[in-house]
Image: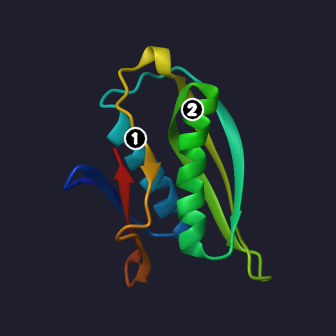
């Protein structure tokens, strides 16, 4: 289980599988980092973030969008993702996550502009969870 980068016309896609919803969120985020950078140094400090949305798919979109925002605001490449996803039971989903922020000055990063809803898939299978997400580059 993990992620693979997939070519997608002028964009890039990440396909991820995980035993749990938490794992697949983390693997998609790791795929986003891999789409931005080939080699990731060991430096950088961890930071936390919390995202809320009305359903699982919107939560995945908003989580990835928040990581791109954090990259731009903090000037870091978010890597080594950990995510905890839960259904709050009141029509809202929450993702409490953390990442290690590698300074952009320490990497040769490609620009990923945005996450898209184009062809986005988040589904449970007999083996766990599968996600497919396209990013605008």
Neighbour class for label 2 at 10 Å: few (<14), some, many (≥20)? few
Residue at horizontal 47%, vertical 14%?
A: 105
Instruction: Tell me whether circle 1 and circle 2 mark residues in contact (CB < 8 Å).
Output: no
Residue at horizontal 33%, vertical 41%?
A: 35
Tell me if 61 is positioned left or right of 136 in this view. Answer: right
Q: Vertically, is 31 above or below 90?
A: above
Residue 112 image offset from top left, x and y in percent? 40, 41
Q: Is residue 100 visible?
A: no
Question: Which of the 4 image quadrants contains residue 91?
Answer: bottom right
Q: Mark 2 — residue?
A: 72
Render colour scheme: rainbow
Q: Which quadrant of the rendered structure holds the N terminus?
A: bottom left
In front of the other: 21 or 19? 21
Neighbour class for label 1 at 10 Å: few (<14), some, many (≥20)? some
Residue 137 image offset from top left, x and y in percent? 34, 43
Residue at horizontal 43%, vertical 60%?
A: 116
Tell me the element at label 2: helix
Q: Vertically, is 91 above or below 23?
A: below
In front of the other: 85 or 20? 85
Give the spatial CA distance, label 1 vs label 2: 11 Å
Tell me the element at label 1: loop
Residue 98 image offset from top left, x and y in percent? 64, 44
Q: Is residue 124 visible?
A: yes
Q: Mark 1 — residue?
A: 112
Total number of numbered discs in the rendering: 2
Residue at horizontal 34%, vertical 71%?
A: 119
Tell me if 2 is positioned left or right of 78 in this view. Answer: left
Q: Vertically, is 130 above or below 102?
A: below
Q: List the single residue furthest toward the right.
A: 90
């Amino acid at each position: 289980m993990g992620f693979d980068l997939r070519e997608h016309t002028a964009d890039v896609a990440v396909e991820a599988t995980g035993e749990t919803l938490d794992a697949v969120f983390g693997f998609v985020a790791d795929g986003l980092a891999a789409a931005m950078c080939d080699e990731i140094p060991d430096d950088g400090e961890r930071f936390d973030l919390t995202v809320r949305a009305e359903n699982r798919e919107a939560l995945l979109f908003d989580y990835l969008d928040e990581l791109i925002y954090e990259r731009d605001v903090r000037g870091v490449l978010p890597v080594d993702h950990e995510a905890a996803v839960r259904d709050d039971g009141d029509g809202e989903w929450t993702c409490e996550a953390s990442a290690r922020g590698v300074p952009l000055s320490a990497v040769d990063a490609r620009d990923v502009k945005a996450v898209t809803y184009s062809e986005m898939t988040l589904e449970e299978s007999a083996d766990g969870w599968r996600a497919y997400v396209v990013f605008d580059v």
